[in-house]
Image (cartoon, grey):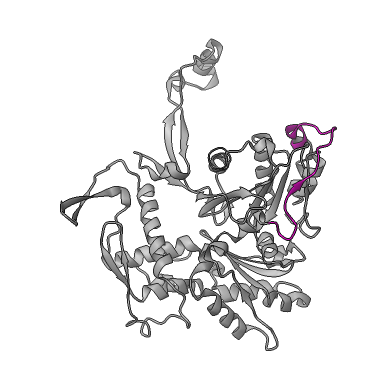
Amino acid sequence: MYGGDEVSAIVIDVGSYSCKAGYAGDDTPKSVFPSVVGSIEQAEDTDEAKPEKEADSASDPKNGSKPMDVDKAKTKRKFYVGQELEFRRDHMEVISPMKDGTVMDWDVVDNIWNHAFRRRLLINPEEHPMLIAEPSINSAQQREKAAELMFEKYKVPALFLAKNAVLTSFASGRATSLVVDSGGGSTVVSAVHDGYVLQKSVATSPIGGEFLTDCMMKSLESKGVVIRPRYSFKKKEVSPGDYKVVDLDFPNTTDSYRLYHMRAIASDIKETVCRVPDTPFDEVAYANVPTTSYELPDGQTIEVGAARFKIPDILFNPFLSQTIPGIDGFGDSTSIRGLPRMVLESVNRCDVDIRKELLSSILLSGGSSSILQLKDRLEKEVLEESPQNARVKVLASGNSTERRFSNSMSAVSGLEGASLHPLGRSSKCGSPKQSMKSTAFPISRGNAHEMVEHACCPSFVLPKMCVGNS
């Protein structure tokens, strides 16, 4: 109960590929939409005249400014989020706020959050406690910025930041596990022990779903396949049941927007036809495998052969991608490892006492983990490299939707009684803004729950092992 009324906590997870938002207690996210946005530079409105003193100061040579500086048009970014991104606009760039799993553009994240609250969930964030699912590699500065934005702008009554790996582990009913999160922009392996992420165990790789999508796109292009974005053509009926594709010319369409739509098609091809091979991919052995048909939006039918095994195998052998024309080499080859090596590397960084338990509870999450046969192949290769008496078990939900959204779903599905139940507000509570300024220090030390408590805002009833792990 909150102020006499029952109020649901909101859970939001902005990933490299999509944003998931929903209510605590629901089985699935209420809304899922792309975490990239459209951006157009626009001139700011100049209807309001500047104060005469300000204008004179700006044109004063003593200040090092020229009179023309006042007339120079200022620009601001206009963002298009969610469905708005699907409509082509001249000069619209497609940008992502994330790089290697970390937020790089908080203006974009702010617009994504606002879209999720106002347009998707249709809620006032001031009335709901908030849980943010964050990457295991999030820095103190990132956490502090997220908290500042939530308290200062959205004025949320309470906030909790939880690691994705912890949420995934609790969703499976485990307090200790090894979480393999293969998302859109990267793959992260983290050990969770008693509800805490062991930071020394975190292993990362830039190989994720988007990289595999690019590999699929370049592989098809090398074979002469032309992927037409949906906005770039229309079908004209020339006779009953017979259509002709007519190209449309939009010269002011940006390269990033065109690439965004081409990737969407290539991603669907990847998800439809690909599967992880039972053994490491070999060009000769897979040269004559049966092909699988796929119909492109413009009506072309393509055949995908060895590439449907080769591209998923890049998760196990990243350097296979170097054999695909058009794929750039890796800048830092030391961070490029296959999944089995990342798993063993993460386990070996942990105390000997918990290694057996980690190997027997390897959890798969993220969109890329939904590729067919990935679970069996990973279990097989990790077992081959593990100690003789080790029991290796890779666990994954049989439902691909659950696996894709396991991080956000775990946050909104209760977590064995860990639903976010806000406590009552203290009568001595100050404003969130004042509290934020006076208590931001705990966030920099990684204790989000302490900040919430010090801020006199309603805290959350969470399992003891979960509190403080954010």
Q: What's the magenta bit mostly, secondary-structure-wise?
A: loop
Residue 327 seen anywhere in this rendered image of the structure: no
Q: What is the tally of numbered marks visible in this picture? A: 0
Vertical placement of residue 117 versus 367, above or below: above
**Nearest to the observer: residue 153 or residue 222:** 153
Q: Residue 49 in the image: state x and y as whole percent.
A: 49, 14
Percent position (x, y) of residue 265?
37, 58
Observer-nearest of 318 and 124: 124
Estimate the x, y position of residue 458 in percent, counting from the top left.
78, 41
* Residue 426, magenta (yes or no): yes
Residue 423 lies left or right of residue 314; in this view the side is right
In the image, what residue occupies the spot 46% across and 27% down?
74
Q: Start and end of the magenta stretch? A: 414-436
Q: Is residue 158 left or right of residue 266?
A: right
Q: Is residue 425 left or right of residue 367?
A: right
Residue 283 seen in render: yes
* Front-most of residues 466 and 414: 414
